[in-house]
Image (spheres, rainbow, N blue to C red):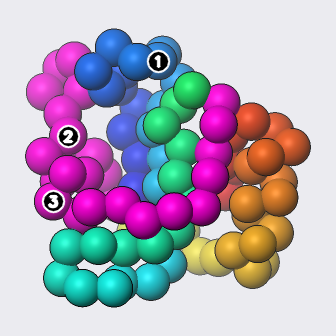
Amino acid sequence: MLTTQENVESTSTRPVSRVPTRLYDPDIAFGLCDLGMGCPELGSVSLSEITALRGALGLPVERDRHFKATKRLSAYAEEATRLNRIQA
């Protein structure tokens, strides 16, 4: 899981979360994304754009190295839709 606890580009005060699951080329991954606006969705994301993101304090997006998936991506997506956020 990739997260930042900062307000990215002032779009929201909620954390930004992404759960990339498949790499299509060196820069495009597919997975569950939540930009912190309460609309998590499955889709493609540019890894270079994620790497370039910085919050208000200049901190980058972090990888949660301790995250271990406990269910299928579809279950995370259904739960995220119900909760309006990714809970992993």
Disc 3 secondary structure class:
helix
Q: Give x and y (percent) for residue 12.
A: 47, 18
For image coordinates 44% across by 83% down, the residue present is 22
Q: Is residue 59 magenta?
A: yes
Relative height, residue 54 to residue 28 (above, below): above
Pointer 1 residue: 12
Cα distance in 3D space between marks 3 and 1:
21 Å
Image quarter for residue 85?
top right
Cα distance in 3D space between marks 2 and 1:
14 Å
For image coordinates 54% across by 44% down, the residue present is 34
Cα distance in 3D space between marks 3 and 2:
9 Å
Relative height, residue 20 to residue 11 (above, below): below
Q: Earlier in the sequence, mark 3 or mark 2?
A: 3
Pointer 2 residue: 53
- Near mark 3 (Cα within 10 A), the count class, few <14, some 14-19 or many ≥20, is few
Residue type, label 3? Ser
Image quarter for residue 65?
bottom left
Residue type, label 2? Leu
Residue type, label 1? Ser
Pointer 3 residue: 48
In-front residue for pair 28/3: 28
Label pair 2/1, CB-CB below 8 angstroms:
no
Q: Give x and y (percent) for residue 49.
A: 20, 51
- The magenta stretch is 38-63
Q: Earlier in the sequence, mark 3 or mark 1?
A: 1
Q: Earlier in the sequence, mark 2 or mark 1?
A: 1
- Near mark 1 (Cα within 10 A), the count class, few <14, some 14-19 or many ≥20, is some
